[in-house]
Image (cartoon, rainbow, N blue to C red):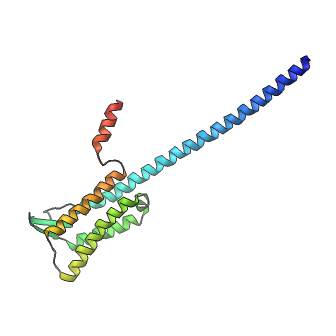
Amino acid sequence: MLIFFFLLKYLLENILKRNLEKTKKYLERELTLEARKDTYKSELAIRQINATEEIWSLFTVTSLSNIGNNIVNYKSENHYYFIKDNAIEFVENFNKTFSTKAGLYIDKDTREALYNFRNYIKEQMIEEYNKTSDRKLNEQQVKEYKRLRTDARLKLRNQVGSFDLTIGHDEFNSKV
């Protein structure tokens, strides 16, 4: 009878040991998978931020200026005109940037807003100039340009979570 208990004890210990080892291997595998998922998500976030920064840099020439080095310039409050070469350069740079990996990491809504802005410059400014040679922009054209530009830039900011930087500031301060 004593031998029976020793055998039973030995069997139970081995079964428990094997189950424990299987559970340990399973947990290690799951933790490794979770770590990989987290790494992958972090890598995607970094790529998305880099892509957004690259696209954001294209907007330098899109601000309204009286200097003459942007797409839309003004001589006075009601006298706006555009510089065709700057507009063409913007469209070319935009297309080049979106043809690289930067275009991969932009969501559909943001991409649509960016393309709407690019298409407005291409169709309503460059192509119209090619038909009429008129560089002047009326109030409605300037208003639409500003609207599309603002929409594209806000969507880019939202893409990386910098839409409202005070939120990040508040979150940081609440953790300190």
Q: Measuring 48% from the left and 48% from the top, which residue is drawn there?
A: 41
x and y, in percent, of residue 73 in the image: 15, 66
Q: Is residue 93 left or right of residue 130?
A: right
Q: 32 or 15: which is nearer to us?
A: 15
Q: Quadrant of residue 74?
A: bottom left
In the rendered view of the protein, which quadrant contains the N terminus?
A: top right
Q: Is residue 70 visible?
A: no
In the rendered view of the protein, which quadrant contains the C terminus?
A: top left
Q: Measuring 34% from the left and 54% from the top, which residue is drawn there?
A: 53
x and y, in percent, of residue 51 in the image: 39, 56
Q: Is residue 138 above or below residue 109?
A: below
Q: Is residue 14 visible?
A: yes
Q: Is residue 169 above or below residue 139?
A: above
Q: Quadrant of residue 93?
A: bottom left
The mark total stands at 0
Q: 1 or 117: which is nearer to us?
A: 1
Q: Name the residue furthest front.
A: 1
Q: Is residue 16 above or below residue 49?
A: above
Q: Is residue 4 above or below residue 172?
A: above
Q: 174 or 129: which is nearer to us?
A: 174
Q: Quadrant of residue 101?
A: bottom left
x and y, in percent, of residue 105 in the image: 42, 57
x and y, in percent, of residue 121 in the image: 26, 70
Q: Name the residue furthest top.
A: 2
Q: Measuring 31% from the left and 66% from the top, which residue is drawn there?
A: 116
Q: Measuring 32% from the left and 63% from the top, which residue is drawn there?
A: 114
